[in-house]
Image (spheres, helix red, strand yellow):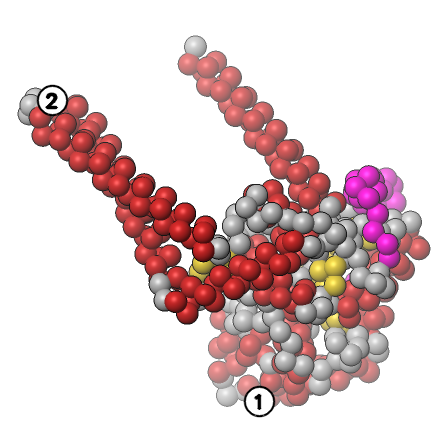
């Protein structure tokens, strides 16, 4: 009987999980399909139905044509020094002193300054396939010193303080009442004593959490200067939310917050968008399918969230996606012929010196556009190697840890290694 009951409960839990997953997935697809802002020179955005059709086209079964040999061009293979790929991107960021966004506040400012342009969720040649998948409906926060500070207006801040005070008073009263009950019990009432103590401990933990929350707010908003600064950040977000992507977003509504985040993440610098459109047009012309683009700009705050499920999301001080110059192409559903064609096209653009590119372990091609279509010099890339090795997980490259590479740098042979990297890059240029 117990086994049957357990089996029924297991079926119910499994069914509930499946339903929740389907609802969440459809909701994300709906949110993304509303991200339809286009730059002046971009293709006109299409509607929600076109988005759904494009997604189905991307995932369609390729049949017998899916198999076959995949030719990986030299340009998309790893360098002998696996940090060289990331160092080339860091070098470009250093060369032009490119601003990187820490959080959604920074991202909003970049959008408002016109540094980033909106990317339609779907056009005839590409579709945003997973962009903003980890955006949630939580309140916007400022990301500082590796922790997040909730942003709110003066009225909302006062409401939060009031709610915390009310919760604290309630918990203190409940704890006092439970202790009073416990004191009146006789020694032989052990079961009741334990039950009451458990309730007291639970409320004590809640009270501790309440006090920590209040302390964090006090720390963030404690001075007039910090209070005004954070509220200015909130006002800048409100300004963008009032008129973005052709609609208004209410920051008090969770669904609107999530939708706004997805829309903001659907942005790129014009240089990167130009490359993306070029690749998408070539791919679409050859296979009559939209190019699936899985990632665009990513603030460092979002990068850390993504890192929990995607080891390729680098955590160095200047992650390429935080510049708006990088985008990822999802090749999970592509046939061997499609992948070979696409890699050959990306290799061509790399030979021209306009991009850095590599195939990642999670079935994505990571593409980084150089600002003026000119690759940084080898000397600058070599000088950027230290910054490119700060991510000990070596995202975008291999599963090997960076320890060996760091030890190698500290060895006496480091100058020789640097010369080898220059020789390697020069050899690569001769191939082009």
In the picture, residue 317 is in which quadrant? bottom right
Please say whether residue 258 is visible from this viewpoint.
no
Residue 387 is labelled as: none
Sort mark 2 into few (<14), some (14-19) or many (20+) by Cα contacts within 10 Å.
Answer: few
* CA separation in Å, label 2 and label 1: 77 Å
Residue 415 is labelled as: 1
Residue 419 colored magenta?
Answer: no
Residue at the location (33% across, 53% down)?
214
Residue at the location (70% across, 42% down)?
29
For disc 2, the marked residue is: 189
Question: Is residue 393 or residue 99 the one in the foreground?
Answer: 99
Residue 120 picture location, percent across and down: 78, 54
Residue 79 picture location, percent across and down: 68, 73
Closer to the N terminus: mark 2 or mark 1? 2
Residue at the location (49% across, 84% down)?
411
| Quarter in which the C terminus is drawn | bottom right
Residue 63 colored magenta?
Answer: yes
In the picture, residue 369 is in which quadrant? bottom right
**Start and end of the magenta stretch?**
43-72
| Quarter in which the N terminus is drawn | top left
| CB-based contact (under 8 Å), mark 2 and mark 1 | no
């Amino acid at each position: 009987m117990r086994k049957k009951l357990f089996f029924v409960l297991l079926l119910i839990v499994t069914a509930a999980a499946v339903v929740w997953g389907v609802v969440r997935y459809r909701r994300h697809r709906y949110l993304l399909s509303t991200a339809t802002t286009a730059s002046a020179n971009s293709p006109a955005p299409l509607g929600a139905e076109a988005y759904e059709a494009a997604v189905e086209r991307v995932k369609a079964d390729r049949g017998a044509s899916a198999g076959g040999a995949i030719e990986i061009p030299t340009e998309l293979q790893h360098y002998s020094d696996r940090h060289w790929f990331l160092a080339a991107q860091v070098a470009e960021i250093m060369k032009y002193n490119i601003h990187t966004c820490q959080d959604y506040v920074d991202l909003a400012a970049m959008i408002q300054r016109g540094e980033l342009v909106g990317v339609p969720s779907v056009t005839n040649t590409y579709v945003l396939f997973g962009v903003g998948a980890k955006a949630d409906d939580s309140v916007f926060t400022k990301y500082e010193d590796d922790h997040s500070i909730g942003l709110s207006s003066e009225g909302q801040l006062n409401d939060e303080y009031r709610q915390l005070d009310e919760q604290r008073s309630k918990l203190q009263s409940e704890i006092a009442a439970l202790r009073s009950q416990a004191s009146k019990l006789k020694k032989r009432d052990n079961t009741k004593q334990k039950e009451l103590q458990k309730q007291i401990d639970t409320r004590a933990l809640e009270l501790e959490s309440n006090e920590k929350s209040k302390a964090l707010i006090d720390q963030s908003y404690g001075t007039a200067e910090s209070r005004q600064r954070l509220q200015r950040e909130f006002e800048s977000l409100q300004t963008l939310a009032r008129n973005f992507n052709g609609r208004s977003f209410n920051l008090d509504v969770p669904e609107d917050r999530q939708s706004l985040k997805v829309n903001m993440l659907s942005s790129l610098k014009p240089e990167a968008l130009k490359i993306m459109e070029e690749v998408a047009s070539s791919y679409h012309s050859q296979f009559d399918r939209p190019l699936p683009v899985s990632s665009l700009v990513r603030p460092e705050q979002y990068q850390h969230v993504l890192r929990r499920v995607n080891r390729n999301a680098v955590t160095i001080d200047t992650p390429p996606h935080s510049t708006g110059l990088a985008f990822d192409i999802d090749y999970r559903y592509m046939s061997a012929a499609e992948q070979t064609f696409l890699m050959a096209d990306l290799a061509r653009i790399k030979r021209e010196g306009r991009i850095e590119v590599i195939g990642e372990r999670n079935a994505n091609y990571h593409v980084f556009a150089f600002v003026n279509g000119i690759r940084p010099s080898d000397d600058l890339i070599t000088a950027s190697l230290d910054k490119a090795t700060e991510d000990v997980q070596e995202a975008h490259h291999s599963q090997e840890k960076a320890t060996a590479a760091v030890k190698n740098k500290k060895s006496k042979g480091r100058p020789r290694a640097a010369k080898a990297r220059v020789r390697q890059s020069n050899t690569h240029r001769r191939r082009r």
